[in-house]
Image (cartoon, helix red, strand yellow):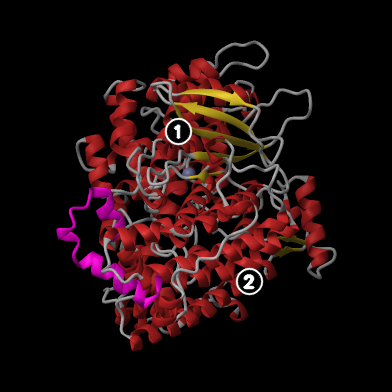
Amino acid sequence: MTTRNLVAALSTVSAAALLSACATTPGGTAMTAPAAASQATAIPEGTGYFAADSTLPFLAPDFTKISEDDYVPAFKQGMAINKAEVAQIIANPEAPTFENTIVALEKSGRMLGRVARVFYALTGSNTNDRLDAIDTEISPELSAHSDSITLNPELFARVKAVYDSRASLGLSVEESRLLEETYKEMVHAGALLTEAEREQVKAINSELSTLTTEFSQKLRTATNAQPLIVDTAEQLAGLSDADIKAAADLATEKGFPGKYAIALQNTTQQPLLPTLENRATREALFKLSYNRADGANPEYDTRLLLARIAALRAQKAALFGEADWASYAMYDRMAKTPETALNFMQQMVPALAATQRREAALLTQAIAAEGGDYAVQPWDWYRYANQIKAERYDLDEDAVMEYFQLEKVLEDGVFYMANKLYGLDFERRTDIPTYHPDVWTYTVFDADGSELGLFYFDPFQRPSKRGGAWMSNFVEQSDLWGTQPVIYNVLNIPKAAPGEAQLVSFDNVNTIFHEFGHALHGFFADQKFESLSGTATARDFVEYPSQVHEMWATWPEVLQNYAKHYQTGETIPMELVEKIEAASKFNQGYDFGEVVAAALLDMKWAALTPQEAAAIDTPAEVDAFERRSLEELGLEIDLVPPRYRSTYFNHIFSDPAGYSAGYYSYLWTEMLDRDSRKWFRENGGLTRANGDHYRQTVLSRGGTMDYFEMFENFAGRQPNVQPMLEARGLAGQSDMVDTEASDGKLPPRSVD
Ligand SMILES: [Zn+2]
């Protein structure tokens, strides 16, 4: 499931953001220049565990020596040191050079980076009340610290001086990229604006911050305060006894004793819709969800809020000389412009709309076969789609799991793939301290036998871990520092009872391959600067290498090596694998369609000019804009509405920037992924030559070059959307499924 994609993206992106806060543009000071000059040499000494590099192999964090008392002082000292380092850069009497400004910035913030990497690893995967409280305390300080660097005018003056002379500096490709990124990031924050413009930006940011908080609070209230209430248990026919009991309890809690309540989830479709037999109940539940914040109950109306947010964003973009918010927000993306993202999505619409119509006809037939005399509606969709799926595939997920044992999946599946493609070898270690006894560690050896890095594998669910799966680094690869990558993968696999075989679902098998794809992107990093190293890439690129590696989970040679029945040792039958893959392509008109519609809606809001946005100033205008935007795209929007309507699109309206103009990223990286799988298949599949080529052109490049160029170096051409449509069964067949293309990928049912 693609929940992991977002979490991994957030994790890697925020790690990159953190790095850039601590290293790319570090330092930052409110001191005036003369004061900075006179105190320039006074860089404070750090104390405690994080003051120096670890003494363990690969600089791995020594969890036997880290105490919770270390974090706050280390953060504070780290920020103070960082500020002093920046003051020193500013006060340097020599003219600005690449070395004394850009490299000096890259080198600063070392202690802050060390503590942040360990701390945020733990708040994700093994937190407690104390760590959460520290997080709440320190986050605003870190954010202010980062701003004070990015918006420091004296620092920017030096960066700009280097940037303006870049053509004559004889920089390497990577050095040029670091200079550009540093400069662009500061410009993006407002460094080139006049004082008056900066004041306007500040005012807009402040209003955006208030409005987005208000949006998310109002939406949360609307969602929680409006469960579906029904009078009788008969109206809930089809639900399990446990679900009906939960509905009775919730009704009592909400002040309706004796009735039944179903809580809303924050997506258009609701999880209980497929099991509800009563069509009127289904319709009521769906409509409640769909209309939760659109004025049906005026108290919960978010329309004016979101319209104002869109208008403010457009105004802010205009201050930066950009046509619209999307153009401003996408400055560091692979796709670069909203037109590119929109054109890309529009290429999918004809096939998708046709599939939606075919699927609707099929579902209406299924309804008729059951004696119904109505055409399928969104509230019926999953009930009948699931029925057809069950008839066709008859998949027993528990039986499938018996072929997937965790240790074999990792060591005989994932590691085997990494050996066949890249020549890597792995050795389990027991001498590296970990933050939890369930974390496994391995040394990773390169094809020539040299040590490549250190890998932590943290597979199991526990209450101290947030949901999803992700990858990040304890130590980034960097030639400047002579560091090798120390990387962790975190998953949420239910742990087997003691003495029982540790089996994993097919979905989790894919996740293990996916997260290790991120890990390889980190292990093969070959950069001088850590802020361009490994997965420090664009939001609409970072999920691509990980997604590609999911293809090997079902590659026959790999499967035969790891997918063995836990009792009989028998290899998984290929027919079963084919059935899993075919089932995963089922119902794409809806599963895929609702995501595409949401991504398009996001981009339409973000692509408004200030004039266009200002014209959307009434609730009715918001409705009209949403409908117009979706209809003009040609999707069957009444059958397959977006996964989120504007009024409850939390990803894009609940944060000053958030995922706004970024929801398309999931689709974009899937295009790169599918096209790359096609390349691998056409070029002989699982071979060292193919692996080495991919490593050389993509996995080792970090964020050092243009991503289109990177893709072209790999594939010999620009990316194409067709393989993605084929893989999703959208390339023009006459049924709900195209079983021909076969390298399974689960649909993004939970792109959250
Ligand atoms: Zn991912």
Q: Is residue 614 above or below residue 670?
A: below
Residue at image point 49% right, 28% down: 444
Residue under label 1, please give it: 550
Q: Which amino acid type is shown beneath numbered disc 2? A: Ala
Residue under label 2, please give it: 222
* Residue 160 located within the stretch drawn in magenta: yes
Query: Is most of the magenta stretch helix, strand or loop?
Result: helix
The span picked out in magenta is: 150-179
Relative to residue 359, is residue 442 drawn left or right? Answer: right
Residue at image point 42% right, 46% down: 481
Please tell me how many numbered marks the rendered image carries: 2
Q: How packed is label 2: few (under 14 Cα within 10 Å), some, or many (20 or more)?
A: many
> Upstream in the sequence, badge 2 or badge 1?
2
Query: Residue 100 falls in which quadrant of the image?
Result: bottom left
Residue 702, image x and y in percent?
Answer: 35, 45
Q: Is 735 in front, or is 10?
A: 10
Label 1 sits on a secondary structure element that is: helix
Q: Is 387 in front, or is 738?
A: 738
CB atoms of marks 2 and 1 within 8 Å: no
Mark 1 C-beta to ligand 1 under 8 Å: no
